[in-house]
Image (cartoon, helix red, strand yellow):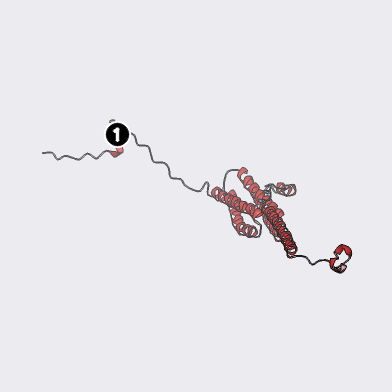
Amino acid sequence: MLSNEHNRTPRDGGPPRSPSKSSRAARALLALACLALACTAAHAQATSATQLEDVAAPPPMRYVPEPLRAQLSAARDLKARTRLSLDLADAQITRAGEHADADRFEEATRELGIYEALIRDVMNFIHKSGPVDNKRRDQYKRIELALRAHVPRIESIRRGLPASNAVYAKATLDYIRGLRTEALNSFYDDTVLREPPPPKKEPDERGGDSSQQSPVKNEKKP
């Protein structure tokens, strides 16, 4: 008769049976599946975060805030208005650079939008002040020189912005280059002498072009 000790099971209080090889393999597979699921979730989360960063930020508004507009309205002289506008625009670039250095990217592009509006405003002010004369040419030249110095500063800001914001800094550069060309064209508007058009050629009695007739040779008399 067999001893009862050999027939004990974990239900009888005896030691548990050692797990089989198939059970260990199943547990290993389950662990691997859990690890793969965790990796997949982490990758999806990282991808989602990257996509959120790549979403284009809203374009900045091109406007002059009321406090700045009040300052500009007080400067009625053409030279004073131009100088004040350029000083305010220069300050906007400085603030945009400070925001970009502090990773406040949307604030940086917003300052650039105000900068664009200030330059456009002073260009309109000069244009509406009267016909181009030496006094206005001096102001257009002053603007052109200022914009030439602004371009590398804005380019430096653009390089420090993420792609979603850098696209708007690039738009600011293109816009300012266009205004610089406009200032140059206004500066030379009344000083360039244009060649007058050639006179119209009248047809002769036979309907041909009189300018294209061959000269008549003088015949010798006998």
**Measuring 65% from the left and 60% from the top, which residue is drawn there?**
160
Residue most extreme to the right: 13
Compared across the picture, whether 80 is left or right of 218 comes to: right
User: Which quarter of the image is occupied by the N terminus?
Assistant: bottom right
Query: Residue 19: percent from the left, percent from the top?
Result: 78, 65
- Residue placed most toward the observer, 57 or 20: 20
Whether residue 103 is visible here, answered yes or no, is: no
Q: Quadrant of residue 211?
A: top left
Query: Residue 137: percent from the left, percent from the top?
Result: 57, 50
In the image, residue 197 sits, relative to residue 162, either above or below, namely above
Disc 1 is placed on an element classified as loop
Number of numbered discs visible in the structure rendering = 1
Residue most extreme to the left: 222
- Residue placed most toward the observer, 18 or 202: 18
Compared across the picture, whether 15 is left or right of 191 comes to: right
Compared across the picture, whether 152 is left or right of 48 comes to: left
- Residue placed most toward the observer, 202 or 89: 89
Query: Residue 194: percent from the left, percent from the top?
Result: 46, 45
- Residue placed most toward the observer, 48 or 103: 48
User: Which quarter of the image is occupied by the C terminus?
Assistant: top left
How many residues crowd mark 1 within 10 Å: few (<14), some (14–19), many (20+)?
Answer: few
Residue most extreme to the front: 1
Q: Badge 1 is on which residue? A: 208
Whether residue 69 is visible here, answered yes or no, is: yes
In the image, residue 184 sits, relative to residue 210, either above or below, namely below
Q: Quadrant of residue 129?
A: top right
Query: Residue 9: percent from the left, percent from the top?
Result: 85, 64
Residue type, mark 1 in image: Gly
